[in-house]
Image: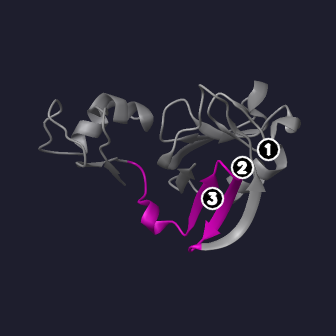
Amino acid sequence: MIHTVKPGETLSSIAGDYRISLGSLIAGNPGITPNLIYVGQRIVIPGFPSPATIPFSISISLSNRTLTLLYQGQTRKVYPIGGGRMLHETPIGDFVIINKAPNPGGPYGTMWMSLSKKGYGIHGTNDPSSIGKYVSRGCVRMYNQDVEELSRTIPIGTLVSIRP
């Protein structure tokens, strides 16, 4: 998969976002100068499929508080979500699902799916009344049965577009 460098990113921060070692990232990009990356540069992320090869994608509208599952660009299902509260807003941008963890415990409900932004994910909840509200620390919350269904449907590498 290819990552396009954004302002403020370093190779270390990119490696952290994708939960891979800096050494693996450098090895996957022969000829790269680690301290001289630039905004817009395309970096190969080893070990992840290209989102273009995956027929599924996810579109999240924070203002509508919805997560839309798309299959080949067509809406397959729309789910209600909860988002980040003031001072802990859900990040805007394009990310990919990098891993899945069933039964993470605590406030994360019955499923956690990490985004390619460290510390953020799509997860279930132990507080279903929070769905439809802005109460999380930036993650996207779903009803447990919805996030379980979504997790069974999409593969690692699925594109997630989060918009205001």
Horizontal side of 105 relative to 43 (left or right) equals right
Q: Which residue is mark 2?
A: 65
Q: Nearer the viewer, mark 1 or mark 3?
A: 1
Q: Are marks 1 and 3 in contact (CB under 8 Å)?
A: no
Graded by Cα atoms within 10 Å as few (under 14), some (14 to 19) or many (20 or more), the crowding at tag 3 reads some
> Is 55 one of the magenta-colored residues?
yes
Per the model, the C-alpha gap separating discs 1 and 3 is 23 Å
According to the image, label 3 marks what residue?
Answer: 154
Numbered circle sitting on residue 132: 1
**Which portion, as a residue range, is magenta?**
47-73
Give the residue type at disc 2.
Arg
Q: Position of residue 123 (x, y in %)?
A: 70, 40
User: Closer to us: mark 2 or mark 3?
Assistant: 2
Give the amino acid type for the residue marked by disc 3 in the picture. Ile
Q: Is residue 105 visible?
A: no
- Marks 1 and 2, Cα distance to the nearest angstrom? 6 Å
- 88 over 66 or under it: above or below: above
Residue 117: percent from the left, percent from the top?
Answer: 48, 37
Q: Residue 17: x, y in percent?
A: 43, 35
Q: Amino acid at mark 1?
A: Gly
Mark pair 2, 3: CA separation:
20 Å
Residue 63 image offset from top left, x and y in percent: 66, 49
Question: Who comes first in sequence, dot 2 or dot 3?
Answer: 2
125 and 23: which one is in front? 125
Residue sitting at 58 percent across and 48 percent down? 164
Does label 1 or label 3 sit earlier along the sequence?
A: 1
* Circle 1/circle 2 CB separation < 8 Å: yes
Residue lying at the far right of the rendered structure: 129
Q: Seen in the image, is 45 located left or right of residue 18? A: left
- Residue 49 sits in which quadrant? bottom left
19 displayed left or right of 63: left
Q: Is residue 62 magenta?
A: yes
